[in-house]
């Protein structure tokens, strides 16, 4: 039975020999880093980001083709970061109706105020709710979307959005433009989360056109836009217009960003039933930058993709390197030990494979597999790489094995009648293992 001290001694000897190969130490360090990166996603990311990489629902809430958030440290123009906006206040509809009546008619009598509230509560209780949001905008490149997210909608509802822009100087007067009922939507009852993107909403763009562009845009620019039919949500982004100052050139963002406090008021009214509890509702500003590495054209987090992809890449790398080193090691040692005609034949085979250009063959083989099977897996690629990649290692191993087989301990093994297989695997291969592991790393 092998003693622990003997195992430890051999391991230390192996490590001492391994350290001589600097490239092996670099490879080992990279391997450790890759293993850590491959393990981390299981603890910090939702597993569905891997299993549903193409259809993960949260990607839909991200900006598309966005740069990383740290770009703001180097860019003179600041990008809008992703932001979730929760309501700072929720009221029942009857409260808002009563307060509006009291304020409009300047009613101050406490008894009358109490009577009005009771009457509205009696008539409109559980009919709906009003959500109030605040958003402080202080960036230069606005978000391309604004998203309304609803959960727990227990009955058919009617949703209305009103927007209050920050104060700005218009014709020498400080003015805050109010887009009252800028958007109205009928939403059916559902148990699923409802995601409403305003990026392509024609009604919102029509409201902005009537209340802002028609009044404050340069008449020539506005007339040309109407003639060219570019005032459609597929061409003109209504969300970007919300964050621009009014004035000539606003349609093309020439007026610059309008910084300040934006207010969003969303009312929800039940169509044919009552709402005992307010549905969960919040806003999402996807922004114009995202995360550490940004997003792709589908809004997928590039950092998440790289970290999940590291696991696959590591698996491929380990399978590939272990297989290539094992084949090259055994092939080179056997060729060197056998010598003679066997060595000549094995080296000619090696040279033929070594001379074949890998990339064109890989492209041709990939195309053939795609035509035959309709798809190609990473295992096909690994197989092709393995077929051609071991040849260089085999040449180096053969030259080293030629020297080792002339050593006295190998001659002694032959003298006592050791078989060729025993000499190869017991005496020659162990001498090459440090180099093999360095090559593998």
Image (cartoon, rainbow, N blue to C red):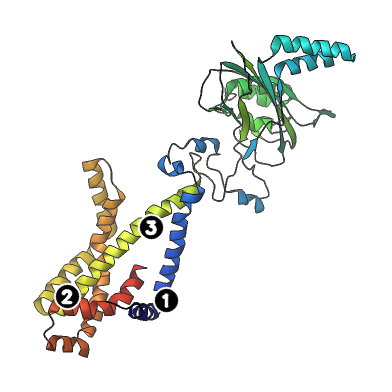
Within 10 Å of disc 3 (Cα), the crowding (few <14, some 14-19, many 20+) is: some
Spatial CA distance of label 2 from label 3 is 31 Å
The answer to whether the residues at label 3 and label 1 have Cβ atoms under 8 Å apart is: no
Which residue position holds label 3? 314
Q: Which residue is mark 2?
A: 335
Q: Counting residues from the N terminus, which is met first, the one under dot 2 or under dot 3? A: 3
What element does badge 3 sit on? Answer: helix
What is the x, y in percent for residue 181? 68, 19
Q: Residues within 10 Å of mark 2 (few under 14, many from 20)?
A: many
Q: Earlier in the sequence, mark 2 or mark 1?
A: 1
Q: CA separation, marks 2 and 1?
A: 28 Å
Q: What residue is drawn where x is 38% and y is 53%?
A: 312
Q: Quadrant of the N terminus?
A: bottom left
Image quarter for residue 140?
top right
Could you say which disc has been placed on residue 322 in the image? Answer: none
Is there a contact, CB below 8 Å, between mark 2 and mark 3?
no
Residue 106 in view here: no
User: Can you say whether 323 is above or below 161 in the image?
Assistant: below
Q: In this picture, is 28 found above or below 221?
A: below
Q: Secondary structure at mark 1?
A: helix
* Residue 68 vertical placement versus 262 (above, below): below
**Residue 22's disc number:** 1
- Residue at image location 66% in from the left, 33% down from the top: 86
Q: Are marks 2 and 1 in contact (CB under 8 Å)?
A: no
Q: Residues within 10 Å of mark 1 (few under 14, many from 20)?
A: few
Mark nearest the camera among 2 and 3 is 3
Q: Judge from the rendering whether residue 412 lies leftward or rightward of residue 69; answer left or right.
A: left
Which type of secondary structure does the marked residue at label 2 adopt? helix
| Separation of residues labelled 3 and 1 (CA atoms) | 21 Å
């Amino acid at each position: 039975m092998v003693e622990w001290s003997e195992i430890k001694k051999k391991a230390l000897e192996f490590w001492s020999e391994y350290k001589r190969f600097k490239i092996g130490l670099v490879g080992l360090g990279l391997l450790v880093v890759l293993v850590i990166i491959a393990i981390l996603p299981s603890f910090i990311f939702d597993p569905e980001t891997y299993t549903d990489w193409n259809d993960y629902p949260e990607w839909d809430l991200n900006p598309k083709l966005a740069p990383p958030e740290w770009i703001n440290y180097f860019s003179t123009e600041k990008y809008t970061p992703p932001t979730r906006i929760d309501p700072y206040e929720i009221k029942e509809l009857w409260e808002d109706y009563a307060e509006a009546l009291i304020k409009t008619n300047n009613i101050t009598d406490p008894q009358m105020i109490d009577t009005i509230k009771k009457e509205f509560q009696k008539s409109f209780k559980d009919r709906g709710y009003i959500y109030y949001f605040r958003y402080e905008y202080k960036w230069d490149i606005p978000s391309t979307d604004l998203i309304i997210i609803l959960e727990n909608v227990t009955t058919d509802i009617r949703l209305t959005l009103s927007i209050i822009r920050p104060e700005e100087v218009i014709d020498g007067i400080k003015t805050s433009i109010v887009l009252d009922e800028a958007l109205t939507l009928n939403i059916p009852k559902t148990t699923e989360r409802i995601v409403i993107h305003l990026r392509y909403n024609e009604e919102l763009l029509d409201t902005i056109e009537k209340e802002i562009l028609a009044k404050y845009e340069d008449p020539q620019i506005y007339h040309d836009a109407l003639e060219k039919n570019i005032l459609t949500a597929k061409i003109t982004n209504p969300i970007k217009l919300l964050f621009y100052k009014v004035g000539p050139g606003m349609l093309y963002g020439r007026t610059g960003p309008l910084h300040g406090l934006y207010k969003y008021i969303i009312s929800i009214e039940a169509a044919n039933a009552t709402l005992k509890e307010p549905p969960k509702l919040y806003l999402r500003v996807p922004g114009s930058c995202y995360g550490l590495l940004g997003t792709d054209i589908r809004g997928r987090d590039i950092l998440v993709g790289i970290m999940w992809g590291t696991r696959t890449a590591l698996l491929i790398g380990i399978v590939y390197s272990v297989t290539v080193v094992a084949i090259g090691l055994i092939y080179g040692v056997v060729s060197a030990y056998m010598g003679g005609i066997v060595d000549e034949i094995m080296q000619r085979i090696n040279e033929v494979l070594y001379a074949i250009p890998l990339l064109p063959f890989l492209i041709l083989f990939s195309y053939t597999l795609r035509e035959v099977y309709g798809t190609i897996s990473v295992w096909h690629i690994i197989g092709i790489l393995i077929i051609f990649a071991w040849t260089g290692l085999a040449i180096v191993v053969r030259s080293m094995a030629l020297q080792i087989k002339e050593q006295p301990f190998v001659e002694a093994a032959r003298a006592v009648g050791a078989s060729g297989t025993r000499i190869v695997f017991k005496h020659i291969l162990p001498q090459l293992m440090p180099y093999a592991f360095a090559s593998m790393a």
